[in-house]
Image: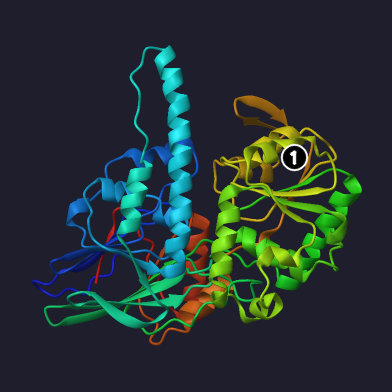
């Protein structure tokens, strides 16, 4: 369904170039008169076929984009910014100050991984007499992105282009994550567009609850978990406690694939808050992710943005100082030494969907052992190794090797950084006037489930734009 509020001679339209019927590749192209801007510019993630889309030309002229508004620092929202800059974009990138610090870490790491992958591929191509390929983007592209970043705070409003004013509200997803309210003026026509970004749940350990949404004429809203609710927070804490107890009884290691930004810091705060309840003192806790270690330091520099309960517990201490048995392993040699630890270790490592990073090495060493437990604490996209483990695969391929899965796999659904169906519906319901809403950032089940809930609760027929669809404002 396309919303059409037509005004002859006026251009106010939004085209979805990602996260339309899927949960990655967020990128929405707004045209307001002579001005063009993007809401996010993220990577497609998942299968090889899905990730191959990142190498395709952008579906608009990067040089014609006047500005970008970035909702938060996750690759599916910011990962194509280097490609945008490489293509000729020279405008400002507006986002919260926390997100600027986190994007620097995230994109630098992504460029390093891209270079390493391309180097390996080019060695294989050279052996076959094929020409080399070029990385998707390089560190110089990341540096250019960072030079174009401009900080915005929560609340207030700033005119970033003539007739375009932006305000940020806390989205509750990760630290610095924002919902974006755009006041648009074009040829005497005024419209308020509210872009939810990724909405977080209420009651997180570290991240404040989402701000109530402001009034709007049109809403572009995420729907990742639009078809279901998560476990309650207390039930989730009980579930984690049971997994920890079972893993200790099994006598091996507990592997925790975790997103370096957001989920890792949430887990550390949960460990601190439940240290005695979960008998964590008997474990050794390792954070084996250079990016997560850096991201944790960024969180500590912006501790004023934490949930009030977390600020009260921390006081003047750093996050990991709340855990006396906590160890960071930034160096490769330290990570390799963990292979000799066969029991009593909780190893938190990226990537969160098991698509790369150090968790792959730990899975390769530990999955064949029946004493091993794996605790999945985040969303696993179709086609990822993490999803295959959740779906009960008996064997998986890691670094070209066939690995038997003898470990026990546990899925903790209640820790999601995305709101569940009821929270999403309440978020929309708090907007005055029941404005037209279009659902993005959700697979078919999520979007259709939330659309049905919004129809039941509010009598609203939600739009489900496909890739390339234009919403006329």
195 lies left or right of 409: left
76 lies left or right of 257: left
157 lies left or right of 6: right
Circle 1 crowding by C-alpha within 10 Å: few under 14, some 14–19, many from 20: some
The residue singled out by tag 1 in the image is: 338
Number of numbered discs present? 1
- Residue at left offset 23%, top offset 60%: 91
Q: Is residue 133 above or below residue 70?
A: above
Is 357 in front, or is 195? 357
Element class at badge 1: helix
Q: Position of residue 120 (x, y in %)?
A: 48, 26
Q: Is residue 117 above or below residue 374?
A: above
Is 71 in front, or is 268? 268
Q: Is residue 372 above or below residue 180?
A: above
> Quarter of the image containing the C terminus?
bottom left
- Residue at left offset 79%, top offset 61%: 324
- Residue at left offset 45%, top offset 25%: 121
Q: Position of residue 291 (x, y in %)?
A: 56, 51
Q: Is residue 225 visible?
A: no
Q: Position of residue 61 (x, y in %)?
A: 19, 51
- In which image quadrant can residue 190 be found? bottom left
- In which image quadrant can residue 250 be found? top right
What residue occupies the far right of the structure in this picture? 249
């Amino acid at each position: 369904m396309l919303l059409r509020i037509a005004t002859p001679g006026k251009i106010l339209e939004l085209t979805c170039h990602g996260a339309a019927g899927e949960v990655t590749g967020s990128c929405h192209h707004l045209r307001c008169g002579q001005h063009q801007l993007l809401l996010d510019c993220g990577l497609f993630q998942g299968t090889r076929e899905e990730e191959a889309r990142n190498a395709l030309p952008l579906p608009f002229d990067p040089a014609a984009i006047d500005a970008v508004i970035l909702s938060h620092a996750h690759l599916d929202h910011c990962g194509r910014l280097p490609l945008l800059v490489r293509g000729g974009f020279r405008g400002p990138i507006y986002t919260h100050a926390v997100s600027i610090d986190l994007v620097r870490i995230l994109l630098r790491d992504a460029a390093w991984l891209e270079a390493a992958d391309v180097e390996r591929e080019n060695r294989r191509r050279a052996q076959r007499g094929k020409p080399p390929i070029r990385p998707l983007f390089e560190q110089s592209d990341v540096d250019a992105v960072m030079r174009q970043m401009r900080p915005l705070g929560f609340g207030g409003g700033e005119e970033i282009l003539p007739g375009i004013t932006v305000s940020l509200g806390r989205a509750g997803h990760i630290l610095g994550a924002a919902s974006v309210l755009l006041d648009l003026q074009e040829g005497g026509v005024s419209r308020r567009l509210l872009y939810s970004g990724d909405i977080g749940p209420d009651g997180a350990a570290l991240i404040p609850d989402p701000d109530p949404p402001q009034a709007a004429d049109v809403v572009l809203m995420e729907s990742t978990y639009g078809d279901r609710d998560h476990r309650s927070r207390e039930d989730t804490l009980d579930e984690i406690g049971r997994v920890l107890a079972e893993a200790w009884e099994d006598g091996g290691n507990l592997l925790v694939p975790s997103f370096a930004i957001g989920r890792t810091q949430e887990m550390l705060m949960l460990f601190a808050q439940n240290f005695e309840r979960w008998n964590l003192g008997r474990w050794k806790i390792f954070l084996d992710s250079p990016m997560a270690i850096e991201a944790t330091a960024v969180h500590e520099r912006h501790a004023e943005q934490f949930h009030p309960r977390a600020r009260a517990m921390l006081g003047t201490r750093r996050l990991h100082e709340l855990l006396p048995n906590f160890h960071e392993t930034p160096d490769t040699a330290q990570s390799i030494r963990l292979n000799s630890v066969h029991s009593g270790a909780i190893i938190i490592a990226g990537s969160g969907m098991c698509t790369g990073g150090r968790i792959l090495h730990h899975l390769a060493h530990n999955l064949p052992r029946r004493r091993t437990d794996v605790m999945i604490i985040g969303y696993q996209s179709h086609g990822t190794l993490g999803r295959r483990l959740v779906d009960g695969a008996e064997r998986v391929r890691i670094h070209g090797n066939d690995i038997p899965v003898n470990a026990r796999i546990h899925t903790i659904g209640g820790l999601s950084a995305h709101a569940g169906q009821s929270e999403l519906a309440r978020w929309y319901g708090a907007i005055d006037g029941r404005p037209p809403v279009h659902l993005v950032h959700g697979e078919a089940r999520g979007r259709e489930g939330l659309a049905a809930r919004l129809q039941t609760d509010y009598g609203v027929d939600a739009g489900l734009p496909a890739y390339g669809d234009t919403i006329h404002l």
